[in-house]
Image (spheres, helix red, strand yellow):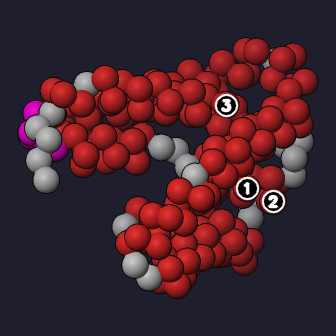
Amino acid sequence: MNDLIMVVAFTPIVALLLGVTEIAVPWQTLMLATVLYVALPLVAGLLTRRSLGSPDAIERYLARIKPLPAIGLVITVALLFALQGEVILSRPGVIALIAVPILIQSYGIFALAYGAAFLMKVPHRIAAPCAMIGTSNFFELAVAVAISIFGLNSGAALATVVGVLVEVPVMLSLVAFANRTRARFPQGN
């Protein structure tokens, strides 16, 4: 559901935000970014799931490819840091201005969502993923769009790189917290 909302809402939201900042980006570029970075991966996932068929085949496939997303994430973060590392190290004040609001937003949204789920006695298997999805800023998508529109050395690319570098450890810390607090939630089916 989250991905379907992204497919429909991404382009208008970006257009609105760019309009507020008076940055001109053609609608065709926004639509292409939406197709390449949201719709295409979603369709590929749906087709893969459909072609595998049974839940057992899907589980075997997921077990085979399990390390690939983590490897891809590490490579992406390493490349982004390598490309923007000099700027990150030479301008710590700018980096803090980007990172601190992301930290506050991420931990704040997680606390609200996870806390609300706890108070509503939502089972942990639902509460934790919902809080994580709500917390995620989709920086992977933002990086792809920023680099394709503004280039590797742009301020937009720098902001998204900082976002990834902040979001990854934040999300890992939240996963650890959710795992440690699992017993406090109803287990439910």
- x, y (%) of residue 167? 57, 33
Q: Determine contact: label 1, label 3, CB under 8 Å.
A: no
- Residue assigned mark 1: 144
Q: Determine contact: label 2, label 1, CB under 8 Å.
A: yes
> Which residue range is magenta in the image?
119-123
Q: How many residues crowd around disc 2 within 10 Å: few (fewer than 14), some, or many (20 or more)?
A: few
Residue at position x 71%, y 22% in the image: 95
The relative height of residue 19 versus residue 88 in the rendered view (above or below) is below
Residue at position x 74%, y 61% in the image: 24
115 or 172: nearer the viewer: 172
30 or 15: nearer the viewer: 30
Name the N-terminal-most of marks 2 and 3: 2
- x, y (%) of residue 87? 87, 25
Q: Nearer the viewer, mark 2 or mark 3?
A: 3
- Residue assigned mark 3: 165
27 or 71: nearer the viewer: 71
120 part of magenta stretch: yes
User: What numbered label is drawn on residue 148?
Assistant: 2
Q: Identify residue type, mark 1.
A: Ala
Q: Identify residue type, mark 3.
A: Leu
- x, y (%) of residue 5? 42, 67
> What is the spatial separation of the Cα atoms under label 2 and label 3, in whole angstroms?
19 Å
